[in-house]
Structure formats: C-alpha cells, structure tokens
Amino acid sequence: MQYLVSVIDDNAGLANPDEEAAIDVFNDRLKAEGHWVFAGGLGSPGAATVIDNRGEEALFSDGPFVETKEYLAGFWIIEAADLDVALKLAAEGSKACNRKIEVRPFL
Amino acid sequence: MSGAGVREAITQAHHQEWARVVASLTRRFGDLDVAEEAAAEAFAAAVERWPADGVPPSPGAWLTTTANRKAIDRIRRENKRGGKQREAQLLHDGDPPGPAGAIGDDRLRLIFTCCHPALAMPTRVALTLRMVAGLTVPEIARAYLVPETTVGRRITRAKAKIKAARIPYRVPSAEDLPARVRGVLAVLFLVFNEGYLATGPGTEPVRPDLTAEAIRLTRLLRALMPDDGEVAGLLALMLLTEARRTARVSASGELVTLAGQDRGSWDAALIAEGHRLVRERLAARVAPGRYQILAAINAVHTSAHDMRDTDWPQVVALYDQLVRLDPSPIIALNRAVAVAELDGPEVALAAIDRLADKLAGYHAYHATRADLLRRLGRNQQSRAAYGKAIELAGNTAETAYLTRRRDQLG
C-alpha cells in the first residue's frame, strides 16, 4: 500500500541545513526499512503554471491553481503496510523536515 | 416462553452479542459494512423467528451463524452483480492469526479501529456507538440531537476512510497501546458526560441511556483489558458518578449540588463496585493516571455521610496530584471548590480569580465564583456572576438551579 506524504509549508521557505541533514537521515531510514518509493522538494508556488487543454486550445496561466497561505512544499511516496505504519513514519518525517505533513492513501 | 420473555431474550442477546458478532464478521470478511449489515439482518431475523421457533439454546451461536450466512449471501449477490473487486476492499488485517485470550478478542480490535486517532472525535463516538454498542443511527441521532442524515453520513464516511486509508483492524503494539487506550477512554468518557450533563434547551438534563451505554462499553473494555489501571479508573469514576445520578436532579428538574443531595438515595451497589475498583488500583501500587485520581476523589465523596464528614484534606491532596498530571484550568477550578471547604471561600476565590482569562467562557467558572461570592456576602457581585453562568450554561437542570440561587440573593 502506498501513501502520499505531503509537506505543508506556510512561507517558512527552503529547508535550513539542520532540516536538510535530518531529512537525509530520515530518507536513509526509509530506504533501509523498505518504505522508500520516491521523494522530492518542489519549487515555490510562484513558479507554477496551470494548463487547461479541455477546450479547443491549451490555455496557460501563471501561478498555482489555488492561492493559499499553506502550500505543498515537497512530498514522499512511501510504502507501508497500513495507516498506523504510515502515520508513524509521517510523524518522524514531520519532525525531520520541521513542517506539517498530510498523509493520503493512493487508490 | 411469553412474548415479553422473548423480547427480553432478544434485548439481552443484543447487549451481549452485538459487538461480538460485528467484530468476528469484520475479522472474517474484512469489511465493516458487510459486518454491520449482516449483524443487523441477523438480529432482525431473531425478532421474526424467535417468537415462533423459541429462543435457541445458544443465542450467540445462532446469531453468529445467521449473520455469517447473511454476509456470504450479500457477497455472492455483489459478485454476481458485477464482480466487484472485493479483494481491494478488504479491511487490512494487521495481525497474524490472533493470540489467545483477551488481546486476541476481535471486539478489542473493533474498539481500537472505531476509536482510531485518524478519525474526527464526533465520528469516533458515532462509529463506536453503532459498531460496538449496537445503537441504531436514529438512536444515536436522538441522543446527540443531530439529524439522522448527519450521523449516517459520519458513519458512512468513516467506513470509507477506514477502507481507503487502510486503518488496520488490530490491537496496537505494546509501545503505542497506552496512548491509544487513552484515545478510547476519551471517547467513552465523552459519551458518558453527554449523558450525565446533557446539553441543549428543552432536553432531559440527564440521559440515562447514554450513561448506561458508556458504562456498558467501559465494562466490556475492562473485561478485555483487566490489567489496565486507567480502564479500571474510568469504570470506577463512571460508576461512582452514576450512583448519584437520581439524587442529582430534583423532582422539579433542578440540579441538586453535592451538599443538598439525599445521600440515602445513592445507589449503594454501584458505590460498592466503584470502591472495590479504587481499592484494587491502590493495591496495585502503580502511579495512577487521571481517571484513577478522579475516581479516588469520587470515592472520598461517596464514603462520607455529609459535606462536613468529607475528608477534604484528602480531596485537595488528590487534586494536587491531578494538577501535576494535567495542569488545565478546569482541574484548577475543581480544586478550588474543594479548597473552599478546607480553607474557606476567600482563599478559593483568590485561586479562581487567577483563572479568569482562561475560563471566562465556561459556565462552571462563573457558577463557582457566584457561589463563593454569595458565601462571602458579596451579593451584588454574586448576582452578576450567576447571570453570566446562566447565560453560558447549556443544561436545563443547571440553568434552573442557578436561576433560583440568583433570585434568592434578594
């Protein structure tokens, strides 16, 4: 079972060196214990472009699809047997990156 | 057997077997929905058949067998209808075939799943009352004064989340157990308190149906986790509180405070059982948690013949212990009530005035203040405090009591 573990930021900016180091340790652990699928940090919402090609031609618009105070700053995709395992890992991830986190199951 | 006898047998079977049937079906079919529906159908079949066929020698076995058959019928129907991917819907069974004894009891898994921290509190309450206590959706809606559709939706969404997010059907690991038990106890205490101090205008001040359900659920948890001190503590607390239920509201529907209660009308059997549990915890010599301390405080009250006979130094000492565990302003307020009996209203008033900014929106803060001011002869301030308490109180019996006290100030 895979879960999307989203990192929620509210303008704290990029991870500082301490946070980066803690994230590295956490990532190593995910890999060592077989939970690692993929992870990545994202550029700021200001760098986003929205595309809508449902009509006759593709429309491009600047910025994220919804302006919010809190935004997705990065994510992990983890493999976990059930939600209890996922929540426990996410709690450690939140500590490591020093941000709030959302856990959501893949279908 | 008479019609009334059969009805009684069905009620009793419902109390004793509902959770067991739902829990074992959930385990077998990996689906709360299937389990709930099949259990409900089995009980409906009992209502239909037992009056004619007689009550079976083992009602529990009859109900389990019938429910199993109903569940299999439903699954076959669904498979025929479109080969739904049952596999994908299976609730995750986190344990290898269960260990023997209480910890392997499916009902315990059911309780922990329904009270999972990933579910919102009102959802945990509704789900626990439906799946474990066996209350119907209309019964839960009535008890909480919310529309049936709201309760129905809460339960449906919860079951969907449990499936989609794969909330495990499992007793938590030893490491997580204390925190998860606290979560379960919080749900049970919430049910009890809503029964004991029902809110809302035009409602009964006490809902004995809810207090009874909470006690029944806590007894079940106690049977499943006999060594857990806080489970014993919460059960003792509920029993010692429930014992005073009828004395707490007058014939005219007004709250009767501890000082004015007819102690002869307290339920001696419940008090004896509560005291036994408190003594058992004392003998265990393990540092008590908050429910055990609250139970001990209630044990002191229920051991006294009247207010003057009450061991107030002991009550204050227990509150001191509680404050160290839980420094919340509400505990500090309750401690001040005991301090008033030990050191006088002036000392208590000074203590609660320090809580003003944290508890300004809490009716009991103003009610306590009003009472202390009254005892100090500061009638004008007392009247204002009663006014504020009346404004904030949600319980009809409390409002009636506070209004009379205010009007008596002259």
Image (spheres, rainbow, N blue to C red):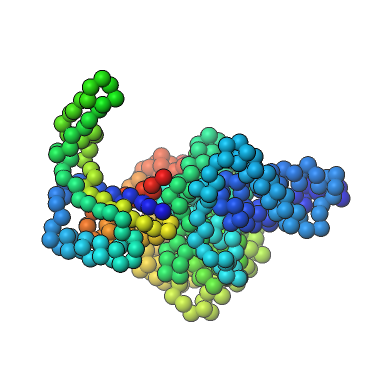
Q: Is residue B348 left or right of residue B77?
A: left
Kindly identify the residue that appears in the image at 12 percent across and 61 percent down: A17
Q: Quadrant of residue A28?
A: bottom left
In front here: A4 or B202?
Answer: A4
Q: Is residue A37 left or right of residue B302?
A: left
Q: Position of residue B135 (x, y in %)?
A: 61, 46
Is B189 drawn above or below residue B72 in the view shown?
below
Is A16 drawn above or below residue B273 in the view shown?
above
Kindly identify the residue that appears in the image at 48 percent across and 79 percent down: B285
In front here: B361 or B94?
Answer: B94
Q: Position of residue B24 (x, y in %)?
A: 62, 57
Q: Residue furthest top?
A: A56
- Tell me how many marks there are: 0
In front here: B337 or B8?
Answer: B8
Q: Is residue B99 visible?
A: yes
Kindly identify the residue that appears in the image at 21 percent across and 40 percent down: A69
Q: Is residue B78 left or right of residue A26?
A: right
Kindly identify the residue that appears in the image at 45 percent across and 70 percent down: B174
Q: Identify the image quadrant of the C terminus of chain A.
A: top left
Is B149 drawn above or below residue B30 in the view shown?
above
Q: Quadrant of residue B180?
A: bottom left
Q: Position of residue A88 (x, y in %)?
A: 36, 60
Q: Position of residue B325 (x, y in %)?
A: 37, 67
Q: Is residue B348 visible?
A: no
